[in-house]
Image (spheres, rainbow, N blue to C red):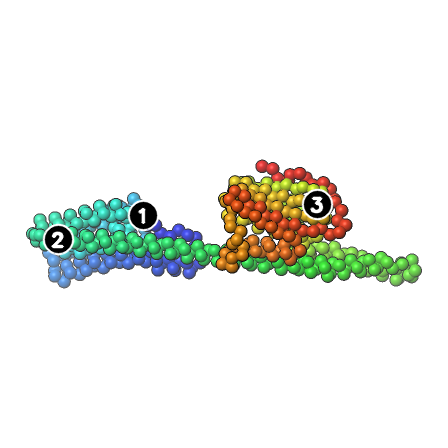
């Protein structure tokens, strides 16, 4: 198995810095080791005034250049094998020129295990060891010592190379874990910000509805109760102007409340807003939508909560449930409006909702939103089915407006 560079998403410069201190910097260290060993060969040839010092220095410079190029440019497996072949060929040239380049072979073996697969690295190790033995016995005439030294060096190189591969793999896994953790923290922070913003928007809409809007409605009622016929001309005109101002202010306040509501509710009914949410989920999984009962007038705060709950529940199904199909159903009864989200996914252990260490922020936010509006919440899950249900009471005297469409989304 070839060790690859970490491929988790990078969200900040700090993540990239951590990567540079991990697998990549370890690899660069091995490249630097080979470059230093090659430089030592050139320095030794200059100091000892070797017979072909010019050629040795030139080939050594080529080795260093190829090593540097490989550290930054070699990405594909085929390119890396060709790059290793070129390095080994240059090393053989150095050896043939009479340079004492045998100790570079140890760095080449380590580099082979860092940049190639174990099988190919073993092949390069065998080729380098055989070359060392041939050069030492045939050209150098150094006998059995070079054979033992070459084999022992190869064994040590293989052990060290395999150790580096293990270190690379563990470093890579740790980096991926760090990336996933940081991404999860970023997503959680973003979700907390969104939830805070939505909660504040809903609180403002609720407060404006219960204070300013109700106050303007009361002013209108009181002004209408005044008998304008008993007022003189200017007073009657002022009363009419006051009524118009109160009515205009109430229209503005209601528009402000609507602007604070979820975007899907702008210019749409509750059923149409939920239909939009289901349609945006796409086809993996398919999310169907249906309405039952006779549509009734319900408070804007409850409508906004139902839209937010549907958005959160559908998002959970798409991201976590591994479901093939889901169904969202809006149900009107005589005194309640209910929402059910049902999917055929893998399910989960609902006991995690009471576990302080579990990451259930989305579900906790939904449950808290329902409780704040005096609704009822239930969640059942098992492998093959998860059902989320919420119910809100309707205001007294909330008469039905029209029969609901039986199904709003069909696929």
Mark toward the start of the polypeptide (1 vs 3): 1
Residue occupied by mark 1 = 2
Which one is closest to the eye, mark 3 or mark 2?
3
- For label 2, count other residues whose C-alpha is less than 10 Å away and answer few (under 14), some (14-19) or many (20+): few
Is disc 1 placed on a helix, strand or loop?
Answer: loop
Instruction: Compare marks 3 and 2 and give the one earlier in the sequence.
Output: 2
Q: Residue at x 67, y 58 (%)?
A: 205
Quadrant where the C terminus is found in the figure: top right
Q: Is residue 398 left or right of residue 176?
A: right
Q: Is residue 107 left or right of residue 362?
A: left
Please report whichever mark, 1 or 2, sits nearer to the chain's N-terminal start: 1
**Mark 3, secondary structure of its residue:** loop
Identify which residue is drawn at 68% across, 58% down.
206
The Cα atoms of the two marked residues, 1 and 2, are separated by 30 Å
Q: Is residue 397 visible?
A: yes
Q: Which residue is mark 2?
A: 148
- For the residue pair 180 and 255, the one nearer the viewer reads as 180
In this picture, is 279 found above or below 235? above
Q: Residue 326 lies in what quarter of the image?
A: top right
Where does the image place residue 203, in percent across and percent down from the top left?
65, 59
Kindly identify which residue carries mark 3.
333
In percent of width and height, residue 394 lies at 71, 50
Q: Tell me how far mark 1 sits from mark 3, CA to CA.
A: 62 Å
The answer to whether residue 306 is left or right of residue 97 is right
């Amino acid at each position: 198995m070839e060790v690859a560079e970490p491929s988790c998403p990078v969200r900040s410069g700090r993540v990239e810095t951590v990567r540079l201190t991990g697998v990549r910097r370890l690899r660069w260290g091995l490249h630097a080791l080979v470059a230093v060993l090659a430089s030592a060969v050139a320095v030794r040839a200059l100091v000892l005034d070797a017979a072909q010092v010019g050629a040795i220095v030139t080939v050594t410079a080529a080795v260093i250049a190829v090593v540097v190029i490989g550290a930054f440019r070699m990405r594909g497996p085929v390119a890396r094998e060709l790059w290793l072949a070129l390095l080994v060929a240059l090393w053989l040239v150095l050896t043939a020129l009479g340079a004492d380049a045998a100790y570079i072979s140890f760095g080449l073996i380590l580099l082979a295990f860092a940049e190639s697969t174990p099988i190919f690295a073993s092949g390069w190790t065998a080729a380098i060891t055989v070359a060392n033995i041939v050069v030492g016995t045939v050209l150098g005439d150094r006998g059995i010592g070079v054979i033992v030294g070459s084999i022992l060096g190869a064994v040590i190189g293989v052990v060290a190379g395999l150790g580096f591969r293990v270190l690379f793999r563990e470093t890579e896994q740790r980096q991926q874990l760090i990336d996933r953790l940081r991404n999860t923290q970023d997503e959680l922070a973003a979700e907390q910000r969104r939830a805070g913003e939505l909660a504040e928007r809903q609180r403002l809409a609720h407060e404006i509805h219960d204070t300013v809007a109700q106050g303007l409605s009361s002013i209108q009622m009181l002004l209408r109760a005044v008998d304008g016929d008993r007022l003189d001309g200017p007073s009657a005109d002022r009363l009419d102007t006051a009524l118009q101002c109160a009515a205009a202010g109430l229209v503005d306040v209601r528009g402000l409340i609507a602007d604070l509501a979820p975007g899907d509710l702008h210019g749409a009914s509750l059923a149409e807003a939920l239909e939009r949410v289901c349609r945006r989920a796409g086809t993996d999984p398919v999310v169907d939508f249906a309405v039952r009962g006779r549509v009734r007038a319900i408070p804007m705060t409850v409508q906004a909560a139902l839209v937010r709950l549907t958005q959160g529940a559908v998002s959970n199904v798409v991201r976590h449930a591994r479901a093939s199909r889901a169904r969202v159903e809006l149900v009107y009864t005589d005194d309640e409006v209910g929402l059910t989200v049902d999917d055929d996914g893998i399910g989960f252990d609902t006991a995690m909702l009471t576990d302080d260490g579990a990451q259930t922020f989305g579900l906790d936010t939904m449950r808290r939103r329902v409780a704040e509006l005096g609704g009822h919440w239930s969640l059942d899950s098992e492998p093959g089915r998860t059902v989320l249900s919420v119910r809100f009471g309707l205001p007294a005297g909330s008469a039905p407006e029209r029969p609901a469409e039986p199904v709003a989304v069909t696929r």
